[in-house]
Every structure is written in structure tokens, then in C-alpha cells.
Image (tube, rainbow, N blue to C red):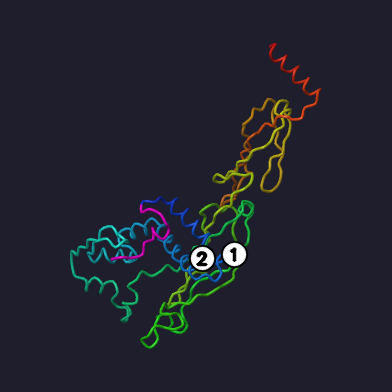
């Protein structure tokens, strides 16, 4: 039973971690996204394939079923009830072992596809999910404040000619080429809430695919955060290095700490050592779906003076003598 190799589609090993799968998907999605490949049918087809693969492999339960039953994973429960057992699924075409504890092929597939008005043969392949995953990259500032995006989406709707059956008068539908669906472009404005992070999924209801029954799935915006020039994000906290002039580090004073909404004054105590970290509570990233915020961790980077004048050098020499004489 050769079938779709979702691992191969994403270019990962069968024992790949969840993080490996997510990273592979994000890398391919950025490369193959329709907005970056207008009119490229091959890239469009590959984009659909990686979305289908990620939709299954990113879900622990679905992945377990896929590992056992391949692209018939959606029928795993029916197979189990019918006593149909299969070893681990091998998409490469290697020999697989099947055992039937009760009934035969006819009764099994009768249980699976019976009562469909004679349309069972068209539904033997796994039904694609109606939900769509759409990768979206945001800046740290956009994630901090929330933002709106105007997006062009390519989804699918039921073919009006064959009404989703794929056939007209017993021949393949010329409009959809037998697939039962036709592409649909729609332009929508979406709201991205404050606090999103890598891997956050924002649901846009009713903007997914449509099936022959008229049911419509949802659109899920899968977030990735663009690296920032000065901030490093860890959870809801932001880490930043703050230059501290030598005289301020020694004598104490104030420095400006950058935040996503502007500078903030920080009091530096006397004799602050290089690398000292100060926590600015509640100045970090907003927590998704929560009124609380993370913190900013400001790490002091003591800046040594350069281009010293003669008088400044003399002062440092005096300081050196005083320190040696202690």
C-alpha cells in the first residue's frame, strides 16, 4: 500500500521531533508561498502538499495514526473496529504485513464506505482537512502592539459545474478536472493580537476550504517572529544589552534602556560590574490572551573611554597609584 510520504514531503526523518517538523515546514512555506511565486503552479502544488503534511505530522494523535495507516489515517478507528491490523506504514513501497482477525476485505470496506449512495469509490482516499495553515511573519514591534494584515489567500470551493462530485455524465468534470473543487482567491484583513510568538496559531473562522456538503473550515495563521536587531525574546521576556559609560558604572547614574515603546530611564548603582543584569518588571512582551506582561532584562555593557586627553590619562594614572597603595 504505497501512499503519500508526509515525512519526505517535509524533508525530515520519521523520528523527527516536533521542533524539527515545525522548522522544516516554516522553511518550505516561506520558499513556496503563492505570494512569493505568482503563477507558479508547481510551487502552488508543493505548497498544498507541505500544508497537508504539516497538518498531520504536527498533531500527535494524527501522526500516530499516520505512522500506522499512512494516508488512510483518517479511517484508523474504523480499521481497528473491523479487526484490520497493519504494521508500521512504509511509504517507500516496501512489503507490508496485513492481518484480518474477522471478516474479509468486502466486509471491512463495506463498513468503511457503505451507505454513501454509491459514491464510496470516490472517497477511498483520505479527505483533506478543511482547515488551512497560513504562515505569517511579524516583527517584534507588531507582536508587541498587535497589528492588522491584508492578505491574499488561495483556498478551494466546491466546483459549481459538478457540485463537488468530480464527474459530469460519468466523465471527469472539465471545470475542475475531476477534483471536485476549484481555486478561489480572496483578499481579507486579519487582526493579529498582541503577544503572538513563534508557533502561535491565530484562528480566523470560516476562511478555510469548502467541501461538497457546504461545510467550511477555518484559517489558522501560524506565526513566526522575525529576528530583532537589539532584543532577544525568551517567552514573554526581552533581553537587551545596555551601554553604560565607565564613569556611570563607577560612580552611579542613569542610562536609557530601549523598550519596544521607547526609552526608559534606569538608575545604575555605584560600582556596577560589567554584565550585571537589571530586571524591569512588566516592560516585556504582552502575554497572549492575558493582561499581564513579561519583563525586560537589561544587561550592563560597560563602555571604556577612548581618545583620552592628557589630563584624563593623568587622572587614571593617579587612580592606578592610589589603588596600588591600598
User: Is the residue 109 above or below the residue 312 in the image?
Assistant: below
Element on which disc 2 rests: strand
Residue 256 position in % (x across, y down)? 72, 39
Q: Left or right: where does residue 196 sit relative to residue 121?
A: right
- On residue 190, the disc is 1
Q: Left or right: where does residue 18 sit relative to residue 252?
A: left
Residue 210 position in % (x across, y down)? 47, 74
Residue 105 position in % (x across, y down)? 21, 71
Give the quarter of the figure containing the N terminus: bottom left
Q: Left or right: where does residue 281 sit relative to residue 245?
A: left
> Which residues, given as a range, are shown in magenta?
1-14
Q: How far is mark 2 from mark 1, CA to CA?
A: 10 Å
Classify mark 2: residues with Cα within 10 Å, few (<14), some (14-19) or many (20+).
many
Classify mark 1: residues with Cα within 10 Å, few (<14), some (14-19) or many (20+).
some
- On residue 201, the disc is none
In percent of the image, x 76 and y 30: which residue is there? 307
- On residue 219, the disc is 2
Residue 28 position in % (x across, y down)? 49, 59
Residue 120 in magenta?
no
Q: Left or right: where does residue 97 sit relative to residue 181?
A: left
Amino acid at each position: 500500500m504505497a501512499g503519500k510520504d508526509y515525512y519526505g514531503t517535509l524533508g525530515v526523518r520519521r523520528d523527527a521531533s516536533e521542533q524539527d517538523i515545525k522548522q522544516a515546514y516554516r522553511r518550505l512555506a516561506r520558499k513556496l508561498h503563492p505570494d512569493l511565486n505568482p503563477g507558479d503552479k508547481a510551487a502552488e502544488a508543493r505548497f498544498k502538499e507541505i500544508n497537508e503534511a504539516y497538518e498531520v505530522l504536527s498533531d500527535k494523535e494524527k501522526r500516530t495514526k499516520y505512522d500506522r495507516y499512512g494516508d488512510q489515517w483518517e479511517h484508523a478507528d474504523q480499521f481497528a473496529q473491523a479487526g484490520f491490523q497493519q504494521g508500521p506504514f512504509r511509504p517507500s513501497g516496501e512489503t507490508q504485513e496485513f492481518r484480518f482477525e474477522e471478516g474479509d476485505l468486502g466486509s471491512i470496506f463495506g463498513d468503511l464506505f457503505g451507505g454513501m449512495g454509491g459514491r464510496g469509490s470516490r472517497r477511498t482516499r483520505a479527505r483533506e482537512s478543511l482547515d488551512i495553515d497560513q504562515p505569517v511573519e511579524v516583527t517584534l514591534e507588531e507582536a508587541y502592539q498587535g497589528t492588522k494584515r491584508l492578505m491574499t489567500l488561495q483556498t478551494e470551493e466546491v466546483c459549481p459545474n459538478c457540485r463537488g462530485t468530480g464527474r459530469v455524465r460519468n466523465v471527469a468534470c472539465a471545470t475542475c478536472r475531476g477534483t471536485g473543487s476549484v481555486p478561489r482567491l480572496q483578499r481579507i484583513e486579519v487582526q493579529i493580537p498582541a503577544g503572538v510568538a513563534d508557533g502561535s496559531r491565530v484562528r480566523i473562522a470560516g476562511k478555510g476550504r469548502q467541501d461538497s456538503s457546504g461545510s467550511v473550515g477555518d484559517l489558522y495563521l501560524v506565526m513566526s517572529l522575525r529576528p530583532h536587531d537589539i532584543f532577544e525574546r525568551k517567552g514573554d521576556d526581552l533581553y537587551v544589552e545596555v551601554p553604560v559609560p565607565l564613569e556611570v558604572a563607577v560612580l552611579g547614574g542613569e542610562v536609557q534602556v530601549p523598550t519596544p515603546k521607547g526609552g526608559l530611564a534606569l538608575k545604575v548603582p555605584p560600582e556596577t560590574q560589567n554584565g550585571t543584569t537589571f530586571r524591569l518588571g512588566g516592560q516585556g512582551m504582552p502575554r497572549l490572551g492575558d493582561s499581564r506582561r513579561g519583563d525586560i532584562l537589561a544587561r550592563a555593557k560597560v563602555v571604556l573611554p577612548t581618545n583620552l586627553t592628557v589630563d584624563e590619562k593623568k587622572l587614571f594614572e593617579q587612580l592606578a597609584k592610589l589603588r596600588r597603595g591600598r
